[in-house]
Amino acid sequence: MSDIVQGLEGFLERLHIYAGLRPILSLVIMLAAVFAVAFAALRGAVRARWIGRNTAAFWLFVSPWIVGFLLFTGGPMVYSLILSFTDWNLIDPAEFVGFANYAEAFSDPDLGQSLKVTLVYAAVSVPLQTVLSLAVALLMNVKVRGIHVFRTIWYLPSLVTGVAQAVLFIWVFNPSYGLVNGLLRLVGVEGPRWLFDADWALATVVIMSLWTVGGNMIIYLAGLQDIAKELYEAAQIDGAGRWRSLWNITLPQISPVIFFNVVTGLIYAMQTFTQGYVVTHNGGGPSDSLLFYVLYLYNNAFSFFRMGYASALAWIFFVMIMVLTALVFRGSAFWVYYESQRPKARKRGAHAG
Amino acid sequence: MPADAKARAVAGDGAARRGPLGTRILALTLLVIGSAGFIYPFLWMIATALRTPEGVAHGGASLWPVQWQWSNFADGLDSFPFWPYLRNSLLSTLVPVVAVVFSSSLVGFAFARIRARGSGPLFAVVLSTLLLPQEVTIVPQFILFKNLDMIDTLWPIIVPTFFGSAFFIFLFRQFYLRLPEALTDAALIDGASWFRIWFSIYLPLSRPIIIATAVLQFMSYWNNFFQAAIYLTTDRWKTLPLALAGFQSVNGTDTPLLMATALVITLPCVLLFFIAQRHIIGGISFTGSK
């Protein structure tokens, strides 16, 4: 493909097109060709009455997504599977090595460490986030005054994400003059060295992750407001107390939302990268205690330029996430409650307003 | 509009279902204590950004005294090429915002309204990509962009957004499904094309979901670090998160400057939140409801 790009860029150069625009224009020309072929094919299919006009229109409408999928997701997936059987440093020709990368992965102590870090982090942070955000949402759902203010306060930290959040928490947990140890000193306790201590570093990142539960909390709050009031009234008439209502109405009713948040939270937690990268200056932290899987993958690809091995790591990661998600889906049958008939009338009433 | 309605519902509709007084007082107390602890690091960040280095050493955990060292902001931004980085950040954020709104709306509309063979299975594929972490495809994507001669430009960040994002396609589809179908039928009888129906009828009606999409997309790309760290290798196109990460490793000891810079970089998101709060909350709540 790089030959075509080179050719197109040479052509654009002769047209005196500004150098910064040449790569994108080459891409646009190639895509235009693809779309033109697709358009002609769909037109022909409609003329020949193989497909209806609507079907043709539909595929034309979704074609941007399909092209994007082939270019940036589907194609790369296949390509990375092929790459994972090679040894390639981007410069020398790729060399086919069979299953050597996978064999290496299974005996790579750093990979083992990164798996441990990532799985422990996900296993601890996701349940804690779920409990915390649901608890706060439940508190706010008791009709207290000033819910606006509370909601803003709990959501605000979610806006400090990524690098800014990492930078802030490096100082919040600074052993000598950070916020947390400062507070602990007020009660006469000398705090741990947090991010600088191999035993505490991961726990610190878990605490960091709890600071941004605001988004989840809002999703729960919306879910709670969606529960039909009649259910509670009926339960009250039957003499159910507050806890029984929580256990038998609120939690089952909101379980699909919990399920949604657990699945997305799990996938998100597995992908943790920025915290490890910024906190440790891309080093992995004390005794590699913050060597998250994606950080290790990144290092293999873009620091050691081991594209084949990094691709193998990516596929192992992919399979792992699929298995974990499948397990959560399987397990969900036992605790997620879907109403056979949702109160449609109320929903329709909502958007009429 | 459902998103609006949700936002209003979340805001609390007054007397709907008040608990007994005791429960309300307990909930309020817990909320006040929790909120105080939760917002404290944020306030501490602001206080630290306004202190002198000596003030930080003495201040410890307290929010007071603050030395009101406003020059920290200017000094923090002066310590790296702030304006070029700001331009890069804006380019790599605003172009994707526009692109993702149009492309996701177009595709979402097709899934919601055009009945066609293969629509259902294809939508399942779209949804399943939501579960796929981007890291899995990052190596081939890097090679792709290298072949396209786009390394160390903003294109690798911008280009994929022109093809829609599965998450926002899903949001738009859900939104359009709730609009009355009569809109489409009437226009079809009048002989309007599907493109016309999308562009002149559905798109103008999508204001709440467009705002929610735009803001959520802005926030995620404004803070985009993973891709930026991979594709942007020289100073020319670096974005603010990269600058901040570099700043942390170089000037790691000058806390006030660091906090001031981090605050400046967070500021657009905070402002945006206060301006579009209703839509953001509507959009986020919308995510969880299937």
Image (cartoon, coloured by chain):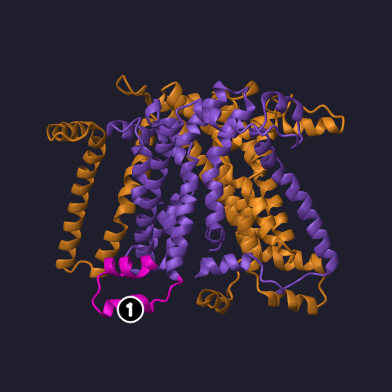
Chain colours: A orange, B purple
Residue A256 percent location from the top left of the image? 60, 61
Residue A278 percent location from the top left of the image? 56, 29
Residue positioned 33% across, 43% down in the render: B159
Q: Can residue B95 be found in the magenta stretch?
A: no
Residue A44 percent location from the top left of the image? 15, 62
Q: Can residue B181 be found in the magenta stretch?
A: yes
Q: Which residue in the structure is indicated by mark 1?
A: B185
Q: Name the one closer to the observer, B93 or A111.
A: B93
Residue A311 appears in the picture as rendered: no
Q: What secondary structure is marked by label 1? A: helix
Residue B102 vs residue A188: left or right?
Answer: left
Main SS of residues in magenta: helix
Residue B61 percent location from the top left of the image? 76, 33
Task: Please determine whether, in this image, residue B140 is positioned above or below residue A59.
Answer: above
Residue positioned 55% across, 63% down in the render: B289
Residue A332 vs residue B214: left or right?
Answer: right
> Label 1 marks which chain's residue?
B
Q: Which residues are magenta?
A: B178-204
Q: Quadrant of residue A208?
A: top right
Residue A181 appears in the picture as rendered: yes
Residue A70 vs residue A311: left or right?
Answer: left
Q: Name the one closer to the observer, B106 or A353.
A: A353
**Which amino acid, mark 1?**
Asp
Residue positioned 80% across, 64% down in the render: B24
Q: Local crowd at mark 1 within 10 Å, few (<14), some, or many (≥20)?
A: few
